[in-house]
Image: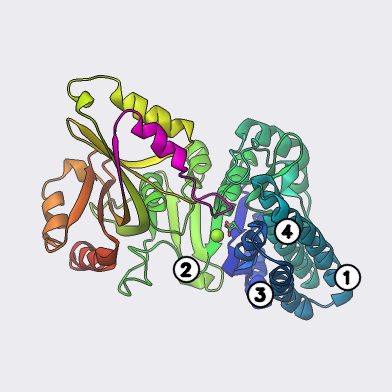
Amino acid sequence: MQNLDIAKFGGTSVANYEAMSNCVKVVTMNPNTKLVVVSACAGVTNLLVELASGACDSAKREEIIAQVFAIHQKIIAQLGNEAQHEAVIKEYLGVVRDLAVQATMTRTDMITDRLVSHGELMSSYLITELFKQQGYKAQWFDVRKVMRTDSNFGKATALVEVISALTKEHLRPLLEGDSIIVTQGFIGADSSGQTTTLGRGGSDYSAALLGESCHAATISIWTDVPGVYTTDPRLVPSAKPIPELTYLEAAEMATFGAKILHPSTLVPAVRCDIPVYVGSSKEPEKGGTWVRPTTEYAPAFRAVALRKNQTLIVLSSPKMVGATGFLAQVFGIFAKYNLSVDLVSTSEVSIAVTLDAGTQTSGLSNIPESLFHELREFCHVKVEHDLSLVAVIGNNMARTSHITAEVFSSIDDYTVRMICYGASSHNLCFLVEQSEAESVLRKLHQRLLESAA
Ligand code: ASP
Ligand code: MG
């Protein structure tokens, strides 16, 4: 279909009947929105992750299942046809219960993914019914038919070419019809049909993957804030919305702070040049942010972002002096553990890197102790916690004078633990003590984004 728009709604946008009704309004306002991708209702994934941890006794298990049921039941109460919809939700929760019992015996990432996928299965079922209740044609679609991934449960990798072929066969023909197609974010299936997940917050990425494979003209990410802000408005009330951002800036923001877009989201959009819109499903009239290949206005400072709970690993060895291949060896070990390094800084005898733990669906740290054993075999290893990463995002930063002076002069009372600058002209990142991070963010925002006229 031409001009296809894909609308993704996050957990808060489908949290209850009223929120879901706003989604229906947003979708039906735009005749090009034919594919709807939803997250689980707010809070549900966390509850399911707790069940999947295997640490719940039977009383706790029943309490959590009752909580999950109550969230969906409230929606059903306003939806009508209660008996029919409750039966569907109860059937899903029956499977959840069985999997939760299994998890108490042996917890695996495979069981976790199957269990946790029910959040999206239930929310997508209910919102499909809501479209119908409000007089629209809607059809529920099981995304696992097309969202093929590898079998890395908990943070599976999407197999783009297979997804494209499967979508062509099973999903694109449906988009030619007159129904709105409603499907799940976050979940997929491997080649043997086992349910997988793309990692916490993965629904944005699902929407972008579907956007790519369905040749969408736009991807709309509907959330609870009207677009991307100059920083987190909960931490800095004077934060302002940004009308337009480039892919590169948005990617830096997603990776280094702003929770609004999942870091992987833009990869498929960039591959196909699809503009991404971010807006609030509750207040669509407030406008939002367009993320595009280029923007008219490209300021040196666009936003500041904060990411907490960073692990800094400092590796040192006298053998590094004049040696070659040391970095390759270190990165080889990180690669073996499938760990992605964010910041890197080197000196003659040492290298410092930061890692971000815990984007796996299970919420378990993905930094295993054996990594440190392996590193210790050939160098000295020091690990530091309680650090936050501050990212200043903008344009042409490494090619403009006064940038570093402006950034650091405003925070010269604070200790900066590590600085990364120059790899990209879109960011300057540094680490500060977690306890000081929020005040650093406020000072920077004031100096770089409020005073400039
Ligand atoms: N429901 C999943 C989560 O909470 C996926 C998402 O919301 O994007 O992580
Ligand atoms: Mg989300």
Say whether marks 4 and 3 touch (CB < 8 Å).
no
Amino acid type of the residue tagged 4 in the rendering: Ala
Residue at which label 1 appears: 84
> Range of the magenta residues?
359-383
**Colour scheme employed for the rendering of this structure:** rainbow
Residue contact at pointers 1 and 4, CB within 8 angstroms: no
With 186 as the anchor, is 396 left or right in this view? Answer: left
Q: Give the residue pinned by disc 4.
A: 100
Residue lying at 35% horizontally and 53% vertically, measured from the top left: 310
For discs 3 and 2, the disc positioned in front in the rendered view:
3
Crowding near pointer 4: few (<14 within 10 Å), some, many (20+)? many
Q: Is mark 3 within 8 Å of ligand 1?
A: no
Label 2, on which residue?
225
Tell me which label, 4 or 3, sits earlier in the chain: 3
Say which of 62 and 392 sits in front: 62
Ligand 1 sits in which quadrant? bottom right
Q: Nearer the viewer, mark 1 or mark 2?
A: 1
Say what secondary structure mark 1 lies in.
Answer: helix
Residue 376 colored in magenta in the image: yes
What amino acid is labelled 2 in the image? Answer: Val
Some atom of ligand 1 lies within 8 Å of the CB belonging to the residue at label 4: no
Secondary structure beneath disc 4? helix
> N-terminal of the two: label 3 or label 2?
3
Residue at 70% in and 56% down: 104
Q: Is residue 138 visible?
A: no
